[in-house]
Image (cartoon, rainbow, N blue to C red):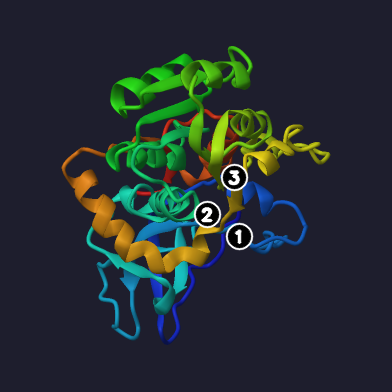
């Protein structure tokens, strides 16, 4: 933690008092000094990430004081944000960081565009009680999936997937091999796999995918803290005979889909057909613990840190 003087906004900038910030799995990769799709965090500089806050100073007046904005300079109590990089929203609603923000867009793009979901598909989602996985599974159900299956790390989360979110089946991956539990949940195979975990989950999904199955490779959280590279799925050769499509994606390359996403998913959120749970930790000083807890699977739904009321 560091105390610094209150920043002063310049022309075209906003001073924003952050209210809620997000911690996300991709941030773990930014702690490694390696080439990636997003630069690593800089030593001696604040971390950053999605946040929602209230505009307290606006020299140019293009965004009025009192407006609420979503921006990318979290991990601090106040931020000077370029007005062009802030999205004005109608309330300090944390859903703009989750189900109605990049989290929801990730689920939507991954399922609809990358995995090319079709009505009648059987869909398997790993990390299904997390922020992205829980939305991806519900979108599949609402768009007419034949069967939606999820994996999670506790019996409580499994019950949440089935009882609260409408998954047809779910299992605790800590209780038995994923391959065995997935085959029991989907004896006729799966058509789509939404991958948030990688590792054993990806290998099991490849084994259960039907001919021409599709995989949206969103994340591989199982390996984020590993010190050596995994061997990879041992059955990857099955992708040849099954003619599988395994495709990775970065959601920031699909921002143009945000209007379509909001038009499709917004009404489901509004009328309660799509539900999103949040795990909230209070205080910037507790943000590191919240982030570490996220990587350990201590959250259900979106993990957020509340900085102010």
Quadrant of the rendered image containing residue 281:
top left
Q: Looking at the picture, how far across and down is residue 179, in whole percent? A: 62, 21
Q: Is residue 246 left or right of residue 171?
A: right
Side of 43 where 271 appears, left or right:
left
How far apart are the alpha carbons under marks 2 and 3? Answer: 22 Å
Q: Are marks 1 and 2 in contact (CB under 8 Å)?
A: yes
Q: Which residue is mark 3?
A: 219
Q: Nearer the viewer, residue 193 or 60?
A: 193
Q: Is residue 308 above or below residue 46?
A: above
Q: Nearer the viewer, mark 3 or mark 1?
A: 3
- Residue 212 lies in quadrant: top right
Does dot 3 land on a helix, a strand or a loop?
loop
CB-based contact (under 8 Å), mark 3 and mark 1: no
Assess whether mark 3 and mark 2 are in contact (beta carbons under 8 angstroms): no
Query: Residue 197: where, in percent of width, then height?
Result: 60, 36
Please tell me whether mark 2 sits on a helix, a strand or a loop. loop
Q: Residue at x 54, y 29 (%)?
A: 297
Q: Which numbered circle lies on residue 75? A: 2
Q: Which residue is mark 1?
A: 46
Residue 290 can be seen, yes or no? yes
């Amino acid at each position: 933690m560091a105390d610094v003087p209150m920043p002063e906004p310049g022309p075209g900038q906003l001073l924003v008092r952050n209210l809620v910030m997000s911690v996300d799995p991709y941030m773990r990769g930014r702690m490694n000094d390696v080439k990636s799709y997003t630069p690593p965090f800089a030593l001696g500089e604040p971390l950053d990430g999605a946040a929602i806050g209230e505009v307290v100073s606006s020299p140019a007046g293009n965004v009025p004081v009192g407006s609420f904005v979503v921006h990318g300079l979290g991990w601090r109590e106040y931020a000077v944000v370029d007005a062009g990089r802030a999205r004005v929203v109608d309330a300090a609603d944390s859903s703009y960081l989750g189900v109605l923000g990049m989290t929801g867009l990730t689920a939507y793009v991954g399922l609809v565009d990358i995995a090319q979901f079709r009505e009648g598909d059987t869909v398997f989602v790993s990390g299904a009680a997390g922020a992205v996985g829980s939305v991806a599974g519900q979108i599949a159900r609402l768009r007419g999936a034949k069967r939606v299956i999820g994996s999670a790390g506790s019996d409580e989360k499994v019950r949440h997937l089935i009882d609260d979110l409408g998954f047809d089946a779910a299992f605790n991956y800590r209780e038995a091999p994923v391959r065995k539990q997935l085959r029991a949940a989907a004896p006729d195979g799966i058509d789509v796999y939404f991958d948030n975990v990688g590792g054993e989950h990806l290998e099991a999904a490849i084994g259960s995918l039907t001919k021409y199955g599709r995989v949206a490779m969103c994340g591989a959280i199982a390996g984020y803290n590993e010190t050596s590279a995994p061997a990879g799925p041992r059955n990857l050769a099955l992708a040849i005979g099954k003619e599988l499509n395994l495709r990775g994606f970065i959601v920031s390359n699909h921002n143009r889909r945000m209007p379509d996403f909001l038009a499709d998913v917004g009404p489901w959120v509004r009328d309660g057909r799509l539900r999103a749970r949040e795990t909230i930790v209070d205080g910037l000083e507790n943000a590191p613990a919240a982030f570490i807890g996220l990587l350990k699977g201590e959250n259900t739904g979106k993990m957020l840190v509340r900085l102010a009321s």
